[in-house]
Amino acid sequence: MTRNATQTRQLLLDEAKRRFARHGYANTTVRDIADGAGVNVALINRYFTSKEGLFEACLQTAFADLKRNTDGLEIADVASSIAYRLTASADDRALLDALLLLVRGSGDERIDALRRTALHTMSERFAIAAGSAQPPGEDALLRAQVLIAATLGVALLRVAVGVQPLASATAEQMRGPLISLVDALTTG
């Protein structure tokens, strides 16, 4: 049976993103990822060089997913977009997993540096979308990072901890509190 290299690479990437997001870098083995993707573990080294290379590719695709879902988004639509993404169905969890991937501890300084870089870039993009000068000043970055932290916290409490009523709240129920949060952070 011949394999499609692009398809195999994508299978590994999807499985790795899901596992890294839910179990963290340190608690995920390359064997777990390969088994979950239904491929030989040696293919991870072929396509990604190492577990670290695979994680870096996961971060890059997670950031690309987040960027694709927020490009051109008006500041007035940010709260609705966040509410929708945080309440995605189990079948539409890729973006939620991307958020979780950004906060799971790794115990590896290089991996944590990659994560910090991705989060800093996200906060710059939000600050600019909120009307900040380019490059954004420290206050604008702080406000953006508070919003990102709140969003990541909601994702963790919903998925990893299951705190109620947050875990079962609908997008419409979450929209109001998120609008208040975004307004407070962008008008201050």
Image: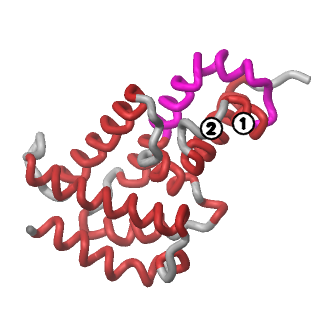
Quadrant into which the C terminus falls: bottom left
Side (left or right) of 126 relative to 174: left
Q: Position of residue 73 (x, y in %)?
A: 32, 59
Q: Secondary structure at mark 1?
A: helix
Q: Position of residue 120 (x, y in %)?
A: 26, 41
Q: Residues within 10 Å of mark 2 (few under 14, many from 20)?
A: some
Q: Residue furthest right?
A: 1
Whether residues under marks 2 and 1 lie with C-beta atoms below 8 angstroms apart, the answer is yes
Region in magenta? 37-61
At 32% from the left and 38% from the top, the residue drawn is 116
Q: Is residue 119 above or below residue 39?
A: below
The circle drawn on residue 32 is 1
Q: Position of residue 105 (x, y in %)?
A: 45, 43
The part of the image, by quadrant, that contains residue 174 is bottom left
Q: Is residue 60 above or below residue 62?
A: above
Residue named by callout 2? 28
